[in-house]
Image (tube, rainbow, N blue to C red):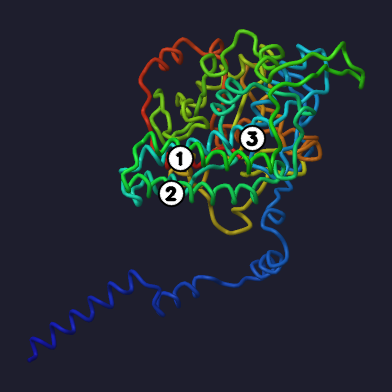
Amino acid sequence: MMKKILLCTLALAFFVSVQAQTDITPDVLKALAGSYTATPADKALRNALNNNSIALMAVNQENAQSPDTYFNVEVKNTGISDQQHSGRCWLFTGTNVLRNRAMKKLGVEDFFFSQVYLFFYDQLEKSNLFLQSIIDTRKEAIDSQTVTWLFQHPLSDGGTYTGVADLVTKYGLVPKDVMPETYNSNSTSEFNGHLKRKLREFGIQLREKGEAGASEKDLQQMKVEQLKTVYRMLVMAYGVPPTSFAWTPKKDGKPLGEAKTYTPQEFYREVCRGDEDLYADYVMLMNDPSRPYNQVYEIEYDRHVYEGHNWKYVNLDIEELKPMVIASLKDSAQMYFSCDVGKFLNRTTGMLDLKNYDYQSLLGTTFGMTKRQRIQSFDSGSTHAMTLMAVDLDHDGKPTKWKVENSWGAESGMKGYLIMTDEWFNEYMFRVVVNRKYCTARVLDLLKQKAVKLPAWDPMFLGEEN
């Protein structure tokens, strides 16, 4: 009997010990509460935080001086675009890079491409990509990771440079006044929600028909009928995309010659294409320390057009990447650039600086993750695309700060622009697209290797720019 009592006692003690290590027991809660001592300074901070935003309270006054706005290497431009309440920064950035070329070709200083024109086809193509992918995976279980991911992400208004390249190459470009923005293109979330719901319904119908024995040809014919509904929905929200238009550039409000009739593809070729291939002649350089450097990667389903290109990039050390970016700017070539813009951004001054906010002193702790750890834990990723246009170099040719053209309107930041310190660039810059002619021989050689294909749910896809 005594042996049984002893065994029961030991078992109970073991249970209590395990429970104490896994649960917040009264004893653990008492220890936690006892670790906090309400000093007068803590009380004052708590009172202030109860009535103010953390960012406002964390402003580092020792770093509040006016930013230095001089850059010794800068690609000049005019006009600031505004994506408003939409996730189309990737599209604004891509067309803004092309806009700079077009203004030089047209001899004007006030010109914008129509973003809603390309966005219409972006959403149509992404709808087809989703529906065709449902057909392609119809024999997989509906709860497989791939099919689950597809239904979770039928489409979005975010994107990357490869989407710009594929869409412009296929559909061309039109001036903004030929197809102007609508309420729903400026504020995409409401309509986007309805379109995603319809696509999921169509996806379920395709799977059910496939399970009933329909052939792939029959399913694709069914998909075309579904896309007719999608097309009508897009027309109602964004307008009818033109197939041809008459247009002439204007300077100071006056036409520069007689109007000429273009197709969108003809307009793109005439005003900004030149001899370049937007995909083949450009390279996406990535700094992702969570993956091995000197390797080419691509992400499955991270494309805008079914027959188009997955997002492909070469992963490099940040210091190897910078000289190619600087070479581009010195040659007056702006670049598609993306980063984690929300980190340490002072929206009033337009400065991206690690010293902008002192969260550690305010909250009484440290934030010590490396860039690699932030990516792995989904704490940081590429969230926003902008146009990289300037760098300031010291006497040794090393960058001290960078400048981008943003797409949040002229009232945002520094009259529509943002300035980032080189230290911030190191920590929160992720990718930049440069012409191959600015790449080193070593990088061009790396691009010959077969890309490692990453799944759609890779952390870098979740950093899609919007």
Q: Residue 355 location in percent, x, y?
A: 65, 42
Give SS at disc 1: helix
- Looking at the rendered image, the quarter that the C terminus falls into is top right
Q: Give the number of the mark in front: 1 or 3.
A: 1
Q: Which mark is residue 222?
A: 1
Disc 1 and disc 3: Cα gap in Å?
22 Å
User: Viewed as shown, does residue 100 lie left or right of 215?
Assistant: right
Upstream in the sequence, badge 2 or badge 3?
A: 3
Q: Residue 170 location in percent, x, y?
A: 58, 22
Q: Nearer the viewer, residue 57 or 405?
A: 405
Upstream in the sequence, badge 1 or badge 3?
A: 3
Q: Nearer the viewer, residue 255 or 416?
A: 255
Q: Which mark is residue 19?
A: none
Instruction: Name the residue type under label 2.
Output: Gln
Evaluate if marks 1 and 2 touch, with contact meaning CB atoms under 8 Å apart: yes
Q: Quadrant of residue 325?
A: top right
Q: Which mark is residue 205?
A: 2
Q: Give the number of the mark in front: 1 or 2.
A: 1
Evaluate if marks 1 and 3 touch, with contact meaning CB atoms under 8 Å apart: no
Q: Residue 392 location in percent, x, y?
A: 69, 22
Q: Residue at x 73, y 44 (%)?
A: 347
Give SS at disc 2: helix
Q: Residue at x 80, y 19 (%)?
A: 247
Q: Residue at x 41, y 41 (%)?
A: 134
Instruction: Name the residue type under label 1.
Output: Met
Disc 2 and disc 3: Cα gap in Å?
24 Å
Upstream in the sequence, badge 1 or badge 2?
A: 2
Q: Which mark is residue 120?
A: 3
